[in-house]
Image (tube, rainbow, N blue to C red):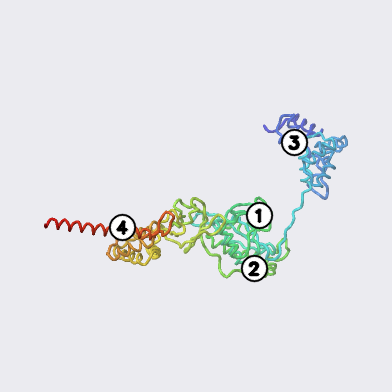
Amino acid sequence: MSNELKVSMKDVIKSLSEKGCSNREIARLLDIHRNSVNKYVRLENSKYATVSPGNSGVEASSKCAKVPAGNCAAGKCVRSRCEPFRAAVEDMLKLGLSAQRIYQYLVCGHGYSGGYDSVKRFVRGIESRFPLPFRRMECLPGEEMQVDFGSGAPLLDAGVRRRTHLFRSVMSCSRKGYSESVMRQTAEDFIRVLENSFRHFGGVPCRVVIDNLKAGVSNADWFDPELNPKLADFCRHYGTFIVPTRPGIPRHKGKIERGVGYVKSNALKGRVFASLAEQNKYLSEWERDVADKRIHGTTREQVCSAFEREKPFLKELPPDLFPCFEEGRRTVHRDGYVEVRGAYYSVPPEYTGSEVWVRWDSRMVKVFNKKNLQITIHVRKSPGKFSTKGEHIHEKKKSRIEEGQEWLLKRIAVIGTCSEAWAKAMLANRGEIGLRVLLGLHSMARKNTASEIESGCRRALDAGEFRLRDVRKFMVQDCEQGSFEFLDEHPLIRKMDFYGEIVKQQEEKNERNTADGNEETQAVRDGTDN
């Protein structure tokens, strides 16, 4: 055998081990693997193992039990450099000190010359011989239910073998159980089997302890786990709450760990069913006839009798079942929609490009953000259809035409009655194309006053003109310069009476000049006649 060491090498390993050398040191000195040293040292020690009458098959706790007594008297039974300080190490362990602190104390106060790794191995060996006992956690009636999944009995349908998943729930006080097989472990399946177990027990426990399966826990965290949003709604519906266990610590739900194995070994082992309904029917009968009538090994009483005392402490069932719906994560498209079963539903513009949680049934589609807050709700549409809400369109992307004819007419009516009358008459005359004309008339209020628009619309209506340029033309024609008020008094302006005197004097002068001119003309005429 190539892996068998020579007899001389075995004797050297034995000799070095009896002298107190550790297995690491022996492996390093002889240049062989440490596992080989462990193997032959263990075989050698087993020859000298002592068996006490009251503890058959267990090695003596003393290290000296592994070597003959003569060698122990000669001081050759020490297997670790920390052995002379065993009492001190045990006292420090009782104080709760770490291996690092113990190493420091041994070096400073006891003259220890070994390494830190030797102290760690020595401390680990002492702690393994005196493990702390597990604490049993018992619950009050109706306080807790533990659930778990396992492998169910296979289905043989038309020659095809299909595996199943076994769900089992157990009331922590009475150990009353419920079992059901499912094909998958989706969130919907998990919720339905939980609901069936509540209906089977006839009430709801205060809390439900589960492990960190994906169907129930989105993000496993011992301090702050994140539950599946649908499961969280289920708990609110039934007035209970979910308590996930610590990852990798199955003893946190120890009452159900053995329960799944009990169903597999007692009810399903060696059985094959033709359908899932047949398997679940058999499990229901087995629970009633076998599991409920057994004397439980821990409580030492019949399960069904213990449950009769626990059942009054369960919470009442709600009048209706938890609504059936589907849900899933979606990414909001660049156009601001999410897709559900081939149809598209709008969401607020600030969620564009982000992930949302969508929940839908045959009638409604609800969209939630990452904090499980509802951000919108839509009526279910058929594939290929769009459901759009006006408030989900960004202000910069909105068109006034989308507001519709009624909205534009209401805005124009604010300008005046003539504008409203012209707008209605224009729509009756021009039809659907007039919607853009309404938009143009509404936009004129940004640069023109209401009176100007009213005047233009009144004249355009009287003339029977229904184009926007006609309204603008009448507005320009109707614009007249208003009268201005002059100042009566100013340091640079003379009084009006002064100007009146000047005008009066000028008129008198003009009259005199006219009279003189008439006389001269008459004289000229008389001379001509003579």
Amino acid identity at mark 3: Tyr
Amino acid identity at mark 4: Gln
Q: Nearer the viewer, mark 1 or mark 3?
A: 1
Where 17 falls versus 215 (above or below)?
above
- Give the SS element for disc 2: loop
Amino acid identity at mark 1: Thr
User: Which residue, given by chain and number where applicable, does mark 4 sit on?
Assistant: 506
Instruction: Tell me how far mark 3 sits from mark 2, CA to CA.
Output: 63 Å
User: Which residue, given by chain and number where applicable, does mark 1 sit on?
Assistant: 245
Side of 335 where 9 appears, left or right: right
Q: Nearer the viewer, mark 3 or mark 2?
A: 2
* CA neighbours of label 2 inside 10 A, class few (<14), some (14 to 19), many (20+): some
Instruction: Tell me how far mark 1 sits from mark 2, CA to CA.
Output: 23 Å
Q: Earlier in the sequence, mark 4 or mark 3?
A: 3
Q: Earlier in the sequence, mark 4 or mark 2?
A: 2
Instruction: Tell me how far mark 4 sits from mark 2, CA to CA.
Output: 115 Å
* Camera sees residue 234: yes
From this viewpoint, which residue is outermost toward the right?
73
User: Which residue, given by chain and number where applicable, does mark 2 sit on?
Assistant: 315
Instruction: Tell me how far mark 4 sits from mark 1, CA to CA.
Output: 116 Å
Q: Nearer the viewer, residue 397 or 121?
A: 397
